Every structure is written in structure tokens, then in C-alpha cells.
Amino acid sequence: MRYGILTIDTKSSNKGNHIIVESIKQTLCLPKESVSVSMFCIPTKEQLDNLNSCDFVLLPGSTILAEGKNNSDAMSILDKITVPKFCVAASGWYPYMKYKTAIFKHITEPVGVRDPHTKREFDKLGIQSILVGCPTMYVKKQNIVAQSPFTIVGFARKNISFQLNLFKALSGRLIGSVQEATFELPLIKQLGIDYFSYENFDIAYKYYSKADKVVSGRLHGVLPAISQDKPIIFFGDTKDSRFSLLTYMGIPINENGNPFELKYIESFVYSNARDELNYNYLIWANQTIYGS
């Protein structure tokens, strides 16, 4: 079978998009040569023909479902796809973005949704869905031992001074995770630390496998750590609906910018919820992809 993926833009500066696509391929055992077409660019006829030659198409990502985030002309691709369509790792983004409800007519139910907030919203809309979490949490654990201990740190976009002070206060060696180079590299330079990029999926997960712990304000800064059973601490906006996934897993959201006690959440806190969501993820795949 041939597989297609309608991606968030893997060529953009946000390489977090890249690990989402690659983790989908790995966790669902899709071939690396799966056809990928960006939902942020108007497809060529050749791209569209190539996509329509697939047996089915996956539609991942929160921003794809978000009103005002996508190129409206690029969204017209959905009316031109003639293969089954599915949605994986999807979520809304309240209060920052609303759902583009017109997209729902294109999605085969049940929809795999990333977080409980989106599940509740889909229930209100009468859309059948399954809470599946994010595939970046289910990448195979590598068990690679580092030569020297280190902590991975990741920057969120808000309250930069707070984060710089927080990371400077951490003891031991720090390594930065870089999803968006233009934003994060200047901050990493201020800390004077080594870093790795999300541009290379395998290298990024090797770092997460080797890390002692992870401190981050990015959702995709901590989700790979969850896949590798790492202690984590997360700080961010408690109003952000995407983070309801972390709350569901028993991971506290420390309000970004406020003082708090640095307490690492060990993997046993979230492991049961992660395994439950992984099971749901496989159920969703059997009802859509593998059962199609």
C-alpha cells in the first residue's frame, strides 16, 4: 500500500513539525518514502496526482485544524483528494485559535485527537473521536547511556528572562533542544551551551534517550522525553488547551513566569496514562488506517 501525509510545513523554521511527521511514520509503521504534501503551500498537479495515487492519506497537526492559520487556497486541496482521509494527533488551540469547522467534512471518523479539551469540543460537535495523545510520545525507547550526565532545556516563546534565569540556576551540563533556530539559537548562545536540532529525527531522539532529565516550556520539548521515560518539568500557560494532554497524564503545568519549586516528575507518574493513550492510538489506527 502507498501512504500519503498532509503535513504541517516540514520546510518551515519550526522543525517540531518534522518530528511529528517522522514519529507518525515510525509508530504506525509507515514506509519512509510515504508521500508528503504541505498544507501550507498550494500543491502542484504532480503533487496532487501523486497523493491521489495513495491508498489513504493521513492528516496530522493542530494548526491544520485552526482557523486563520492555513493558506485558504492551499486548503482547497482537500476538495481534490480522492482517497480516504484521516486525522491523527489533531487538536484545537484555545484560546489562541478556533477550529476550522469546514475541514470536518473531509475527515473520516473516528478522528484521533491529541488532548482532552479537543475531545470535549468534538463531542459537542457530534464528531466521533478517540483520545490518542501524540505519536511523539510513543517512539520506541532507545536506552542509550550518555558518557556524561546532562539536562535538556527548551525555550517557550513567552517570558524569556524568566527562562534564562531558570536555566542558569540549573546545576550540571545543559544541552538545548532547537525546534526553531531563528528564535532559540540566540538564547542558547546567551547560555553558552551545546544544542541539537529537531531537523534530524534520529539524532533528536538519541539526545532524549541519553538525557538525565528535561526542563522545557515547549509541548514538543517534553513529549519526546515522555517516550524515553525521562524525568521532566514543564512550565507554560495553563490556559493553553493543548496542555490539557499533560494535565490528563498527571504532569503539572507550572505557570510560566511565576516562581515555583523545581520538582522533576518521574516517569512512573505519567507511564500508565501514556500506555493507555498508546493503546487508544492503536485502536484508532485499526479502525481507520489498518481497517480501511
Image (cartoon, rainbow, N blue to C red):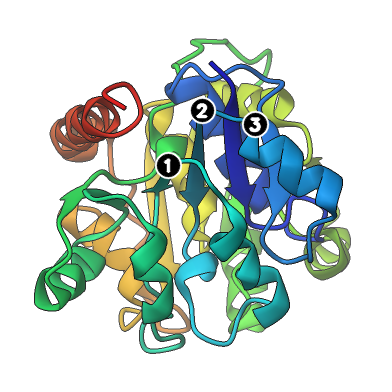
Instruction: Please tell me how crowded label 2 is: few (under 14), some (14-19), or many (20+) other residues with Cα within 10 Å.
Output: some
Question: The C terminus is located in which quarter?
Answer: top left
Q: Do the residues under discs 1 and 3 have CB atoms within 8 angstroms? A: no
Q: How many marks?
A: 3
Spatial CA distance of label 2 from label 1 is 7 Å
Seen from the viewer's position, the closer of residues 288 and 13 is: 288
**SS class, disc 2:** loop
Residue 85 lies left or right of residue 288; in this view the side is right
Q: Is residue 174 visible?
A: no
Q: Position of residue 33 (x, y in %)?
A: 72, 21
Seen from the viewer's position, the closer of residues 23 and 270 is: 23
Which amino acid does the dot numbered 3 rest on? Answer: Ser
Q: Position of residue 28 (x, y in %)?
A: 43, 23
Residue 137 lies left or right of residue 214; in this view the side is left
Q: Do the residues under discs 3 and 2 have CB atoms within 8 angstroms? A: no
Q: Do the residues under discs 2 and 1 have CB atoms within 8 angstroms? A: yes
Earlier sequence position, callout 1 versus callout 3: 3
Instruction: Identify residue for label 1.
Output: 84
The picture quadrant where one finds residue 161 is bottom right
